[in-house]
Amino acid sequence: MPTFTTLVKEELINVEEEQQLHSELAALIRLCGRIIFTNMGMGVAIQTESAATSRRIYVLLKKLYAVHTEIMVRRKTKLKKNNVYIIRVEKAKEILTDIHMLGEDGFELRIDERLIASTNDKIGYLRGAFLASGSVNDPRVSRYHLEIFSQSREHAEDLMDVMNSFELNTKVTDRKRGSITYIKEAEKITDFIGLIGATNALFAFEDMRITRDMRNAINRISNCEIANEQKSIRATEQQIANIELIRDELGFEVLGSKAQQVAHFRLANPDATLAELAEIMNEARISISKSGINHNMRAIATLADNIRSSTK
């Protein structure tokens, strides 16, 4: 069964937004690519484990630059079953210059302002970044979490600024091999997924989230009811223990008339709640309320505690 991340990426590869494609390709190359040198000059090798992402890169290169590309598929080690897709482009210097990515020592660490000049450009860059190294937890089984991995802290922080221009409450933290730009709030994750064009995934995420939240709410209510029931059982057991102690040590005669009645009815109805006990006593033509029973139970508890203290 495909992961939720795969579902999002499968939808994104079919997005058609002409104004965003250069920025999207720049993000894909920046996060998946590396510069190579061959006898034909500077080239770029773009590597990904996502078949959907590799197809998108291939389509964008052909559409924007009509360059010759080679695609290779490699099997990873036995412990990792995923394929690795490598797209190689020769004579890539013009492409890298055109998408404002080429610095003196390789890829620029920062996101060039010309790549994110407009709202559409920002959306394209974010879509490319997610396709390149993004992931989102399945809302049915995990905590809410979406992240995009960058090898440099500078790029992760720039990506955070772009995302936060859409009020996504994004943050950055470091990992062993780089940094991640991440979102933790479910509502902001759905905003991001919708923003980059995965509308169907957005609805699926919301449906899963609502189902999960409802299930959690039901579990909380159930746990609360169980806890209240256990508390009530413990309270009833203590009431009966107090009444039996007074009966055995002093006799019911030490209690007031109403307390004696409460004690007799409690022993005869050990499973009844205080409200049910009041109803039973009223049916027996003994006028008393739940609070009245509770008051007498406190008096019985005080006397039982005094008995226990005197026998220590």
Image (spheres, grey):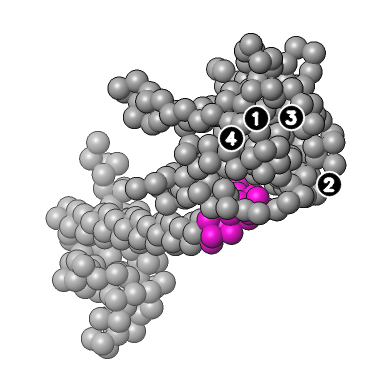
Q: Secondary structure at mark 4?
A: helix
Q: Which residues are magenta?
A: 185-203
Q: Residues within 10 Å of mark 1 (few under 14, many from 20)?
A: many
Q: Which residue is mark 3?
A: 95
Which badge, 3 or 4, is on the more N-terminal residue?
A: 3
Which badge, 2 or 1, is on the more N-terminal residue?
A: 1
Q: Is residue 295 above or below residue 49?
A: below
Q: Is residue 129 visible?
A: no
Q: Amino acid at mark 2?
A: Ser
Q: Secondary structure at mark 3?
A: helix
Q: Secondary structure at mark 1?
A: helix
How far separated are the C-alphas under marks 1 and 4? 8 Å
How far separated are the C-alphas under marks 3 and 4? 18 Å
Q: Quadrant of residue 34?
A: top right
How far separated are the C-alphas under marks 2 and 3? 21 Å
**Is the Cβ of the residue at disc 3 closer than 8 Å to that at disc 1?**
no
Q: Quadrant of residue 169?
A: top right
Q: Which residue is mark 4?
A: 132
Q: Residue at x 53, y 41 (%)?
A: 55
Q: Position of residue 6 (x, y in %)?
A: 47, 45
Q: Amino acid at mark 4?
A: Ala
Q: Position of residue 10 (x, y in %)?
A: 50, 49
Q: Residues within 10 Å of mark 4 (few under 14, many from 20)?
A: many
Q: Residue at x 50, y 42 (%)?
A: 52
Which badge, 3 or 1, is on the more N-terminal residue?
A: 1
Which badge, 1 or 4, is on the more N-terminal residue?
A: 1
Q: Which residue is mark 1?
A: 29
Q: Position of residue 8 (x, y in %)?
A: 52, 49
Q: Which residue is mark 2?
A: 118
Q: Nearer the viewer, mark 2 or mark 3?
A: 3
